[in-house]
Amino acid sequence: MTVTGEWHGVSPKYLGVEVVSSIIGGLVLAAVTVPFILNGSWFGWPALAVAVVIGLTTLALAPRRVRSIGYRLRDDDLEFKRGIMFHRVVSVPYGRMQLIDVNRGPVARALGLAELKFVTAAAATGVTIPGLVDAEATALRDELVALAESRRVGL
Amino acid sequence: MSEQPGDGGPIQGGPIQGGLSQGATGHGGQGGPRQAGTDLTDGEWHRLHPATPLLRGGIVLIAVLGFVIANFRERLVDWVFGAPDLPGDPLQTAYERGQIGWLGLIVVGALVIGIAGFYLSWRTHSFRVGDDVVEVRSGILFRTHRRARLDRIQGIGIDRPVFARLFGAAKLDISVAGQDAKVQLAYLGSAGADRLRRDVLVLASGLQAREQVEAEERTADALGQAGGQVPGVQVPGEQVPGGVPAQAGAVPPQQRERLVNQRMRELLAPELDPTLAAPESVVRIPPGRLIASLVLSGFTIGLLVVAAVLVTTSMLGDRLFVVFLLLPGAAAAFGYYGRRFTKSLRYSIAGTPDGVRVGFGLLSTSNDTLPPGRIHAIEVSQPLLWRPVGWWMIRINRAGAAGEGSAQSSTTMLPVGTIDDVRKVLGLLLPGLAGEHTRGLVLAGLVAREGGGFDDAPRRAWPIRPLSWRRTGTALTDDAILIRTGFIWRRLMVVPLARVQSLRLSQGPLQRMLDLVGLTAHTVSGPVRATVDAVDRERGTAAFELWTVRVDAAGAADRTQRWAAPPTTPTTPEGDPR
C-alpha cells in the first residue's frame, strides 16, 4: 500500500453489506405501506409494489454500486470516487486530513471489513471508504496518517 | 510554555524586555504591584476587570438587594430590635413582621451568597498569555482550564456591550477553530483589551514582527512621553496616555478625573483609531444607504409576500385572527430592522499589519481582527432589489465563528457597498486580489454578462441554468479560485487555494446527459458554498486536476500560521495535531 496512483477497488465481500442494507431498506419501505393496506386504502397495494420495486432495483444495482467505489493515492492527495447515477470524485490533499476513523458496522464486522472515514476541517468533504479488509484498512490508515503528518498544513 | 517573560526566543534578549518594562512603568504608574513593570502578555496570571461580576449579571443581584433593603429596612430594623411602636393589633403585626423578617432574611442571605459567588468567580477567573499559548482558568467548584495555541488563532474580537462600555470594559474573544472553541476574556479594561489584542496578535504573528513592533513601540513610547503625537504609526499601537488599569487595583484619586474624561473619549471615539489604519482603506457606509439596503433586502420581499397572503386570507375569512398575527409580526419585523440597523451602523474596515479589522455597532460595538490567511471563502452577492442601485454585500467563511449568536456580524464583512467598496474590501481580505489582472477578473465576476477571463458553461447547459449559463463559470488566479454564478442573483465566490480542504467533481444524471460536471471546493462551514454545477466535462475535469495540484502546492507554501515570521524559520511545529 504505497503511493502509486492506481485505482483500488473495495473488497468484493462488501457486496454482502450492501445486499443486507438494501434488503433492510426495502423491508422498511414495505413495512411503511402495511398500515395503509390494513386500513384498506386504495393506494396501499400500489405503494407496496413501488416499495418492492425500489428494493429490488437497489438490490440489483448493488454489485455495480460496489464496483463504482474506488480510491487511489496520488503524490499529493487521496482521490475517492463512488456512485453510478450521481457520480462523484473527491480529492483530499494529504495535508488537509485532520483525523481518520476506522469504523465497523455489525454486518461488516461479521465479514471482516472496516470503513475508513476522513475528516477535514470542512464538514462537506464526507469521504468514507467502505468495505476495506481489516488489515488493509489499518495499513491504509497508518499510511495516510504518516502522509498527513509529513505534509500537515494549517487550516 | 514559558513562565519567564524574557525567554520567548533566542533572538530576543534581555535588553529588549528591559526596554519594554521601562516603557510600561513609565506609562503613568498604572495599576497595583501585580502589574509593576509587566504587561498582560508577560506569562503571568492576570485577573479580569473588577467590574466583571457586575457586568456578568451580578448587577441584578445588587439591584434586588438594594430594593429589598430599601423596602424592608424599617421592618427589618423592627424585627431585629423588636419594640413595635405602631398602632394596630400588636400581636397580629408582630406575627406578620416575624414572617416578613424571616423571608427578608432568607432573601438577603441568598443575595449575599450570590454576590459572594460572583466575587469568588471573579477571583478565580484568571488568564495568562505566554509566547505560544493563551490560557484561561475559571470556576469555583468545577475548575476549567483552557489553553489555545496562538498560531491557531482564527480571529480576535473585542465586544463592547453598551452596559460594559459605561464601565469602560470590553470583552475579548480569541477564537480558534472548532465548535465553541474560543477563549473568552470577559471583561477587560477597554484600553487593556486593545493592548492585549495587539500583543496577542504580535505574539501570534511570529518572532520577527515581535522584534519590529517592540523596537517601534519603544520609539513610540518615547515619543508619547515627550508629549508628541504619533502620526500614522504602522503598528496598531495603543497610545492613550494614562490608560485604564487593565485589571484589579484601586484607581488613585488624582487619576479619577482623567479616567472620566477618557471614558467619555472611549465612548465617543470611532471604533477604529484613524491613526492605526490607512484612512483611504476605510469604507464608509452612509446611514441612509444602510436604511435603504435594509428596506430593499430579501427580508422585505418575504415580509411583503407574507403580508399580502395574510391580507388576502383576511378578505376571505376571520379578520380578528389576522390582526393577531399581523401585529406581533410587524413588531418582530421592526425589531429585526432595528437590530440589523444598529448592528451595522458605524461599520468600519481597515487593514492592519496583523490582518483585517472590522468594526460594527452603534451602542454595543464589536470589533474583529482576522489575521491573514484566516478567511476561508468570500462571497460577493447582490440581492435582487439592490441591483438597480448597484450595491453588494460581502460575506465570508471563517473557522471558529460558526454557529454562534453573533455569527451574522462576524461573517459579514461588508453589509452594503458600491462596487468600488467591494474592490477595496476584497483587496483587504485577500491581498492577492488587488493585482491589476485579478482586478479585471473580479470586476468581470461581478458584473460581466459573460467571459472576461472566466471559463463559462457551454450553451448546452441551459436546461440547468436557463438564464445564467453564459455567466456561470470559474477562473483561477495565483492564489484563489473564483466562481461566478447567477444572472438574477449575481454572486461571485472567491476561495483562497491555501484554504481549500478538499475538492469534489460530481455528475448527476441530467449533467451526464448534457455532458457537464459540477465542481465544489470544500471549505470550513459558513454562509458561503463554493460550488458550480454546470461546467463542460472535459474542461471541468482538467480544472479539477489543475486545482488539486494547485491546492496542495498552495497549502504547502502557506505560511500564514505565523504570518509575520521569517519564511525560512520553521516556527510552525510540523505535524502538530490541532
Image (cartoon, coloured by chain):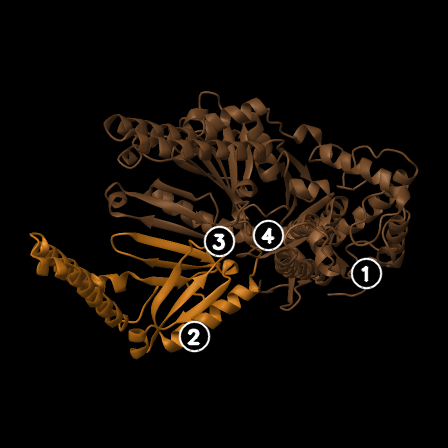
Chain colours: A orange, B brown
> Which residue is the site of mark 4?
B557
Q: Nearer the viewer, residue B33 or B375?
A: B33
Q: Are marks 4 and 2 on the same chain?
A: no
As shown in the figure, which amino acid type bears the numbered disc 3?
Gln
As shown in the figure, which amino acid type bears the numbered disc 1?
Pro
Q: Secondary structure at mark 2?
A: helix
Q: Residue at x 32, y 78 (%)?
A: A112
> Which residue is the site of mark 1?
B5
Q: Residues within 10 Å of mark 3 (few under 14, many from 20)?
A: many
> Which residue is the site of mark 3?
B501
Between the residue at mark 2 and the residue at mark 1, the CA separation in whole angstroms equals: 45 Å
As shown in the figure, which amino acid type bears the numbered disc 4?
Ala
Between the residue at mark 4 and the residue at mark 1, the CA separation in whole angstroms equals: 31 Å
Between the residue at mark 3 and the residue at mark 4, the CA separation in whole angstroms equals: 15 Å
Q: Are marks 2 and 3 on the same chain?
A: no
Q: Nearer the viewer, residue A6 or B145?
A: B145
Q: Are marks 3 and 4 on the same chain?
A: yes
Q: Position of residue B115 (x, y in %)?
A: 69, 57
Please say if A133 is above or below B215: below
The image quadrant where one finds the C terminus of chain B is bottom right
Chain to which the residue tagged by mark 1 belongs: B
> Which residue is the site of mark 2?
A138
The image quadrant where one finds the N terminus of chain B is bottom right
Chain to which the residue tagged by mark 2 belongs: A
Between the residue at mark 2 and the residue at mark 3, the CA separation in whole angstroms equals: 23 Å
